[in-house]
Image (spheres, grey):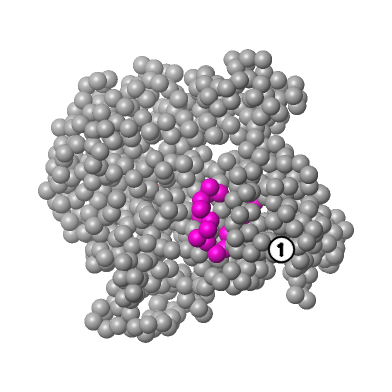
Amino acid sequence: MTMPRIMFGGDYNPEQWPEEVWAEDMRLMTEAGVSLVSVGIFAWSRVEPRPGEYDFDWFDRVMDNLAEAGIGASLATMTASPPPWLSRRHPEVLPERADGTRLWPGARQHYCPSSPIYREYATRLVEQVATRYANHPALRLWHVGNEYGCHVRACYCDVSAADFRRWLQERYGDIETLNAAWSTTFWSQRYADWDEIMPPRTAPTFGNPAQELDFARFSDAAIRACYLAERDILRQITPHVPVTTNFIGLAHKPIDSFRWAAEQDVVSLDSYPDPFEPWAHVAAAFGYDLVRSARSGQPWLLMEQAPSAVNWRERNAPKPPGLMRLWSWQAVAQGADAVLFFQWRQSVGGAEKFHSAMVPHGGARTRTHQEIRALGRELAGAAELAGTRVRADVAVLHDWENWWALESDAHPATLDLLETHLVHYWPLFDAGLTCDVVPPTADLAGYRLVVVPNLYLMSAATADALRRYVSAGGHLVVSFFTGIVDEHDRVHPGGYPAPLRDVLGLRIDEFWPLPEGATVELDHAGRRWTGTVWSEWLDVEGAEVVATFAAGPATHPLAAELAGRPAVTRHRYGDGVAWYLATRPEPALMRELLDRAAAEAGVAPVLPGLPDHVQAVVRHGADRAYLFLLNHGAEAVTVPVPTPAVNLLGDRERPVTEVTLPPRGVAVLRTETAG
Ligand code: GLA
């Protein structure tokens, strides 16, 4: 699907307001250049006040007002927060935690994803909504549910237990296959019958990791089934209207965005970087690269962000002047075709009344609203960006199944996959390299450099894909604790990482993780550096040693015993090169190693010599390219531009050969290309 322009707007919840306010909403939206709003997300209890009794008249007026104002509706299926009558009538729809705590109504998302009753009432409502608004002129997009898996990541109730058994039977066919996959002879866990199997509820100590991994897979599938049930109805009634559901943050652990993306027409993301966090934009960038990659580079929608502060952190920072604009343009630079906010008008009651909004409590005269209007004007003037695409030479591999398995208990050390990703992504970002974030099943042939952080769970198919990639000339960087187990969390025996030893040219016999906060010194290129988190007993089998562990004042005494042994290696394999990191190098060394790997792979930065804290990204059109320059730093910088270009956010009459960006400044430079 293609947007006619970069869409601009937000969540619109008119049901919180008397109708007199709606006319002002339409006037202010028009003045601000709003083109798309998400409506109806939390409207279930208003449109179906009693089971089967519908009241859509007021919502018709909302939709009509939007159509009249020329504003599109990203129309919700209204199923995100069931009305009180549903759980009163059917208490069994309420979800349960692993310890048996029932989650009661009073907030939102209080339903068990496996509940046939929830699904029945939800799909019945979707049919009503879809039929009623199928041909409404305001309808542009379906917004199914809302942030699936946000509050209820999994449900452990008896209904879910039965659904889990059904799912397992489908996956394994017979109980002996499951016993083998789950290694159930360990700790006397052998099952004789399907009915003996439970979700991994709170147990005396570490649960069975294969059972937990399958439960994570199942929970994702159960939540996805809710989405699919609604999506299928929409496809049937309105095949002409695209469907999305909003993902969360840089990546949300319970929801496998890669699998979900294949079931949508366009992907959308809610992003709430913390303005107190100086590097929030780097983490956000990772999320934007991931969501864009989830549908192979197709433009995505920034479905929600905060105009200023959120209300759900311990301390909630406002966005100072210019930051909302900068972060909005960052999303566009990284491939978004919509910039939407939560929410249009700030609530006066309810749990989110201190969350900022496009129209704050102080009204249209506020700083935030004035910045919103200015952004609306800018985006309206940049319609030509819609549909253009970002291209990347570098891929970072991310896999949800690995995430679930890697972070399970009783491992050599506790590892946090998102943190690990950012440790690898950050130097690539700083070097001005554009990255995709792709699943191991992606076609890697188009990338010059592939970075694999902690891919602990590795199927034989993934190992083969990586082998083929390197053998055909690809450059691969692999970090420790990769290629350790198969899809059932069973170790690949024969020296770690058995499935990749030939590609990496090495063998690891033992992991030597470092204590919390400890470091190990490293020798590289005649200098001393440090590593953290991990070290290991590694023997090369053909690989060249690039850095070694060293003893020194900063080295933890136990790790000192590894002095002289390999810490970073490089191996030529087929026509390509495979690097291995047996520790987490300090940021400067990580940057140096990745710079070398990228240079050898022939990857060039978007702009050479980019000043610090300036992000550069290109979106490509048919015969034009748009270079985005974003100054995330606190100092003004001047950036030379390779060929004279028009700044879409500046004086369009005068092409420029350099731009000066104040702190939080943005430029979008258009150049004509051969295509
Ligand atoms: C999420 C939800 C919204 C709202 C915002 C507040 O993104 O989808 O309904 O709660 O958070 O930040």
164 and 478: which one is in front? 478
Image coordinates for residue 573, horizontal then vertical, percent: 68, 61
Q: Is residue 34 above or below residue 151?
A: below
Residue ranking furthest to the left: 68
Image coordinates for residue 398, horizontal then vertical, percent: 55, 50
* Relative horizontal placement of residue 435, taking residue 369 as reference (left or right): right
Residue 438 appears in the figure: yes
Residue shown at the point (58%, 31%) measured from the top left: 214
Residue shown at the point (40%, 68%) measured from the top left: 618
Most frequent secondary structure within the magenta stretch: loop
Q: In the image, is residue 443 part of the stretch drawn in magenta?
A: yes
Residue shown at the point (60%, 47%) measured from the top left: 462
Residue ranking furthest to the right: 561
Check disc 1 and give the amino acid type.
Answer: His
Q: Is residue 362 above or below residue 668?
A: above
Image coordinates for residue 13, horizontal then vertical, percent: 27, 42
355 and 154: which one is in front? 154
Residue shown at the point (34%, 74%) measured from the top left: 674
For disc 1, the marked residue is 571
444 and 591: which one is in front? 444
Q: How many marks?
A: 1
Q: Secondary structure at mark 1?
A: strand
* Relative horizontal placement of residue 64, taking residue 78 as reference (left or right): left
Residues rendered magenta in the picture: 437-455
**Within 10 Å of the Cα at label 1, are there few (<14), some (14-19), or many (20+) other Cα atoms?**
many
Image quadrant in which the C terminus is located: bottom left
Q: Is residue 104 above or below residue 404?
A: above
Image coordinates for residue 237, horizontal then vertical, percent: 23, 33
Q: Is mark 1 within 8 Å of ligand 1?
A: no
